[in-house]
Image (tube, rainbow, N blue to C red):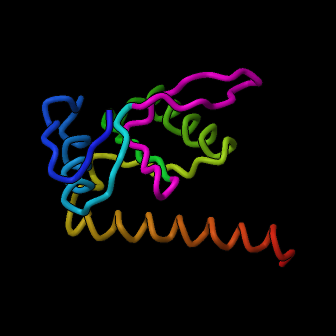
C-alpha cells in the first residue's frame, strides 16, 4: 500500500508512531510504500520483509520500533538494521522517544544526511577517491 499526499489511510497503521510518520510524509509530499514487500538476503536465503516505510525516491527505509525495553525486540531491531545495510538499504530505526521536540526537522535532516552519505559512497566507488 502506498501513501500519497492528501491520502487518508490512518486506519491502516499498526501504531501511533507509524501514523505520525505517515502524516509527516504526506504533509511533506514524500511518497512512501507502507509494509510493502522487500526482498532481502539473510543467511544466504532470499526472504520477503515488510519495512514500515519505504521511501522509494530516496532509497531509504524507515522503521518504527515501538516496543523498547524488551531485550529480544532490541536484538531483532539491530539484526534488521544490519540485514538492511548488507542488502544496500539504508534504514532509520525510530523509537517512541524520537517524537520529541522538532522531530520532523530531525527526520528530514537524517534522510538528507543518508542521501549525502550514499552520494559520497557512489563518488568514491566511481572515481576511486
The residue sitting at 18% across, 39% down in the picture is 16
Q: Is residue 46 magenta?
A: yes
Residue 19, horizontal then vertical, whole percent: 20, 42
Total numbered labels:
0
Quadrant of the rendering where the N terminus is positioned:
top left
Q: Is residue 37 above or below residue 66?
A: above
Q: Is residue 54 left or right of residue 21?
A: right
In the displayed structure, 1 sits above or below 82; it is above
Q: Nearer the viewer, residue 48 or 103?
A: 48
Report the front residue among 75 and 32: 32
Q: Position of residue 86 (x, y in %)?
A: 69, 43
For the record, the magenta segment spans 36-59
In-image side of 78 versus 102 (left or right): right
Residue located farthest toward the right when viewing the structure as drawn: 128
Is residue 2 placed above or below 126 in the rendered structure? above
Position of residue 99 measured from the top left corner of the image (x, y, whole percent): 23, 56
Taking the spot 63% from the left edge, 46% from the top edge, the residue there is 85
* 109 inside magenta stretch: no
- The residue drawn where x is 53% and y is 64% is 114
The image quadrant where one finds the C terminus is bottom right
Residue located 35% across and 67% down the image:
108
Amino acid at each position: 500500500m502506498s501513501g500519497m499526499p492528501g491520502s487518508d489511510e490512518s486506519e491502516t497503521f499498526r501504531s501511533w508512531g507509524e501514523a505520525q510518520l505517515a502524516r509527516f510524509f504526506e504533509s511533506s509530499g514524500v511518497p512512501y510504500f507502507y509494509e510493502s514487500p522487500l526482498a532481502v538476503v539473510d543467511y544466504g536465503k532470499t526472504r520477503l520483509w515488510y519495512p514500515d516505510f519505504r521511501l522509494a525516491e530516496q532509497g531509504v527505509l524507515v522503521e518504527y520500533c515501538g516496543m523498547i525495553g524488551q531485550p529480544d525486540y532490541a536484538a531483532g531491531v539491530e539484526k534488521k538494521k544490519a540485514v538492511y545495510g548488507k542488502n544496500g538499504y539504508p534504514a532509520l530505526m525510530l523509537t517512541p522517544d524520537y517524537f520529541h521536540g522538532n522531530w520532523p526537522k530531525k527526520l528530514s535532516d537524517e534522510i538528507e544526511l543518508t542521501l549525502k552519505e550514499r552520494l559520497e559512497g557512489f563518488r568514491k566507488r566511481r572515481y576511486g577517491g
